[in-house]
Amino acid sequence: MPNFRLFTTFERSKLNIDCIKKFGVNFDIDTGIDPEDVISTGGLYTWVKNNANPITISSTSALDTTSGTGVQRIRMKGFDSDWNLQQEDINLNGTTEISSVNNYHRLFRIESLRSGSTDINQGDIVAKHDGTTEIA
């Protein structure tokens, strides 16, 4: 049986390490792809290219905007070009793509920080690397 060491918050701060809670599900495990990643789309995760670049964020709905009824503000979490953790908050502008300030080598989480009266996104929140490759 594997032996895992759990660190307290104090120990993590002294050792300069972070903890990431990664979770997910794969509803479509195929036997033709080995292994598969734990992502809701099934298959393999679309990795960002060799270089860290800005991420563009948009919605498929005009209601996901700072004055809309859907998601208004999101937080992105991922890794920079040196694999350091980073995050930033972005105000959505409906179907218009908004570019991140930071460059990302990998994006692993997008979460809603603020929403309008519906308390849920009204469209699909789309993240793209290099403006063309959809990654989330």
Image (cartoon, rainbow, N blue to C red):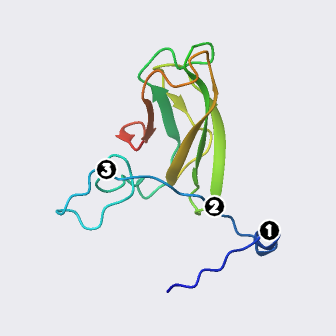
27 relative to 72 in the view: left or right: left
Q: CA distance from mark 1 to mark 2?
A: 15 Å
Label 1 sits on what residue type?
Answer: Ser
Residue occupying image coordinates x 53% and y 42%:
54
- The residue carrying pointer 2 sits among few (fewer than 14), some (14 to 19) or many (20 or more) residues within 10 Å by Cα, namely few
Q: Which of the two discs, 1 and 2, labels the residue nearer the N terminus? A: 1
Residue 127 drawn at (x, y percent): 45, 37
Residue 49 drawn at (x, y percent): 40, 54
46 relative to 95 in the view: left or right: left
Under circle 2, the secondary element is loop
Residue 68 against residue 4 in the figure, above or below? above
Q: What residue is disc 2 on? A: 84
Number of residue marks: 3
Label 1 with label 3: CB-CB less than 8 Å: no
Q: What residue is disc 3 on? A: 27
Residue 52 visible at all: no
Label 3 sits on what residue type?
Answer: Phe
